[in-house]
Amino acid sequence: MSNLTETIEVVVSAAAGGTNDTRVLRLTRQDGAPLPAYRPGAHVDVYLPNGLVRQYSLCGPNARAPDYRIAVKRSGESRGGSEWLYSRAGDGVRLRIGMPRHAFGVDDTARHHILVAGGIGVTPILSMAYALHASGKSYQFEYFVRSDADIVFRDEILASPLARQTRIHPALAPDAVRERIVDLLAASQAHSHLYVCGPPALMQTTAELARGVLGNANVHMEAFGPSVPVAAGERRFAVMLGTDGKAVEVPPDKSVLACLRDAGHVIESSCEVGVCGTCMMRVIEGEPDHRDSYLTEDERMEGTHFIPCVSRSKSPVLVLASDA
Ligand code: FES
């Protein structure tokens, strides 16, 4: 797991429009030294002056560049994070970021890579496409957007060597998106891996279809929001910290994290939408119902870790430890 505590002071060295509601920021170290290299698909925590912490994928064309590039989409549902960065993080603004985290990235054993992006989900996918291209690997890049106006990095992609492997799909209805995914999976080569990042509906559809064709282990996804929203009709369960801990009730409309805090437990958190891993706990007993976007498929199957800000329990009682 990544170092969760080390941070770097950076300055916004360039801020430019991406689309009508997206802003592209270049981050440079305040002391002028190069920023750490990262693996394509990585993201960083961005610590905002208003106290919020948000996660952004590093989307530059070169993972060894001395600076980082992120793209910020202004969200109608912003709780103050993307809105602040979109409207206030102009040239010269100082920020603090975490070290790159690598919860998503290309599998070097794949013979072919299918990259699927939706909207702003293009950010980790773009850096992966650049890396695959640079290393001469076989890949295709499928980019779904609501409209032509929502194509982030449009000119850059079309002018780059990625253009030949890229298909941009504007304004497709959900059924047409599904058909396109079915078609590309039907044409997929043996030992292909698929990677998807974008809105929950696209990710869910793509991952379900892809797992049926490629197998669980060959499907990789990253979301910057809860991968499965808390639905109406959730069941009540109990959590305990340690086998001799006191049972804490978790009602359908409240997270495990909130319930444990209400019961007096101190648990560190950051994103609180299941993407950063800061709140991760260890499972001692019980069967987690994973709703996060942080654990890998293998880690979920192992069932030894749990993300309490979004995940729930399939068993009536879940026994956890805070020393993950
Ligand atoms: S606080 Fe980020 S995953 Fe829970």
Image (cartoon, helix red, strand yellow):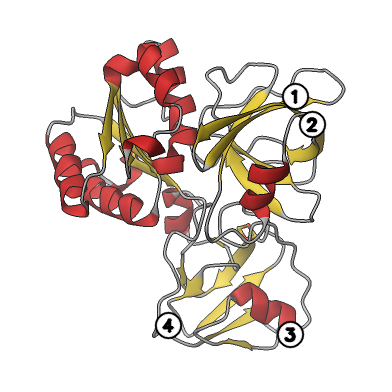
Q: Residue at x 40, y 82 (%)?
A: 232
Query: Given the image, on which type of amino acid does mark 1 rest?
Result: Thr
Query: Which residue lies at the image location 40% right of the left edge and 39% below the top edge?
Result: 150
Question: How many neighbours does mark 1 have within 10 angstroms: few (below 14), some (14-19), or many (20 or more)?
Answer: many
Image side of residue 275 versus residue 296, left or right: right
**Quarter of the image with the C terminus in it:** bottom right
- Read off the residue under disc 3: 263
In this rendering, the label closer to the viewer, 2 or 4: 2
Where, quadrant-wise, is the N terminus in this rendering?
top right
Which residue lies under the disc numbered 2?
10
Of the two numbered discs 3 and 1 on the same chain, state the one appearing first in sequence: 1
Please state the horizontal and vertical placement of residue 206, each as a whole percent of the image.
27, 48
Q: Amino acid at mark 2?
A: Val
What residue is pinned by disc 4? 234
Residue type at mark 4?
Glu
Do the CB atoms of the residues marked 2 and 1 lie less than 8 Å apart?
A: yes
Res. 241 in view: no
* Cα separation between marks 2 and 1: 5 Å
Instruction: Decide: is 134 above or below 219.
Output: above
Say which element carries label 3: loop
In the image, what residue type sits under mark 3?
A: Ala
